[in-house]
Amino acid sequence: MEEVLRIRVKHGAKAKGEPDAKKRKLDFRKVNLKDLLAPYGEVDQYKLNTPFSAFVKFVNPDSITKAKLGLNNKKFGDFMLQVDIRKKDTFLKKEKLDKFGPKNVNRGEGFEKIKGLVLVENFVDEKVEDSLIDYFKNSDSAWEKPQESTKENESEIPSQPTRRRVQHYGFKFDYITRRGDTDNPLDNWPPLIDSLRPRINSEVSKALGKGISWISDQGTVNEYVTGEGIAKHIDTHSAFEDGIASLSVGSDSVFRFAPGEDENDDRAIEVLIPRRSLFIMTGDSRYYFTHQMPQRKSDKIDSKIVYRGTRYSITLRQIKYTACNCNYKSLCE
């Protein structure tokens, strides 16, 4: 007999009445098991046991206890997960890790499939990266926690407001309205970040083309410790102009992009955002594709497992003062 992890949808966890079996089956099969389990260890085997439960065996037996502690009573959409440890004969179906574990991402690939997404590698050198990280580590007074949101389903809120430290420049980003607080401008751009703005503005203007002069006036720094991610979202159309730029330092990261109406991410594309690089979202990548950073402690890059470190993102936007006239009205607020 060997120990395996059993994951189930917890019955009676839906706030507004018990779901019928069909609904429960649909929701459980939407659980992204690879993202749920990646933080706890390498998976050896798994099996979908019923429409409502799955058995998992880890390579390292110690991972079972860690996964149970981390996942039991974890919220999943309208439901809660229930996790326990069972002893079973060897019956699990062998599956290749490539099919189950983190999807392999090759450097430089995937961007051509996402219209409007631009990557500028080595935008800053190691010396500038070190200076930025040093500033973030020693600017305790500038960090704050995002305010709590009143939205019912926090899994849809890109801020993950109870977890991350943030800094705001120019205008504070309001995590409830998802807009810049233009009533209270801030005159607080740190000199080092301010010195990078002209180059970033130039890169975004070039990406937009058509003689557009893009000028950033709102900045947000997010600190992502190992294992943290970004929930799937599209930045508010009417809040910011076309063109959003983000500079990553400290650690590589994998981002997932998917068409906005694709609820199950069946057509998702994952791309590698290397440290010290600048990525820019314009056009479709800005208005049509959702983006997220899967919540896990490692990624599979060039067929090798790479563990994440603390990552800082410096995101620059331009406040929009007119109504949105994009081509994706169904995704517009």
Image (cartoon, rainbow, N blue to C red):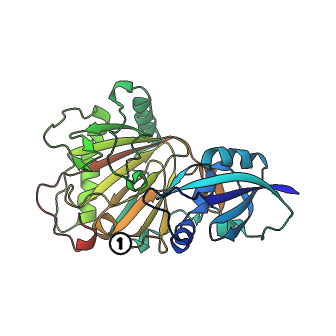
Residue 111 visible = yes
Residue 328 visible = no
Quadrant housing residue 182: top left
Front position in the image: 301 or 172: 172
Instruction: Give the total of numbered labels.
Output: 1
- Furthest toward the front, the residue is 17
Q: Where's residue 51, x and y in %?
A: 63, 71
For the N terminus, the quadrant is: bottom right
Quadrant housing residue 327: bottom left
**Label 1: which secondary element:** loop
Q: Amino acid at mark 1?
A: Lys
Q: Residue at x 29, y 64 (%)?
A: 282
Q: Where's residue 99, x and y in %?
A: 66, 70
Judge left or right: residue 100 versus residue 132. right
Q: Residue at x 37, y 73 (%)?
A: 261
Q: Where's residue 270, x and y in %?
A: 50, 65
Q: Where's residue 70, x and y in %?
A: 62, 45
- Furthest toward the right, the residue is 1
* Vertical placement of residue 62 versus 299, above or below: above
Instruction: Name the residue tied to disc 1.
Output: 115
Front position in the image: 78 or 14: 14
Q: Residue at x 83, y 68 (%)?
A: 91
Judge left or right: residue 131 versus residue 198. right
Judge left or right: residue 324 versus residue 74. left
- Furthest toward the left, the residue is 322
Quadrant housing residue 153: bottom left
* Vertical placement of residue 190 versus 174, above or below: above
Badge 1: few (under 14), some or many (20 or more) residues near its Cα, within 10 Å? some
For the C terminus, the quadrant is: bottom left
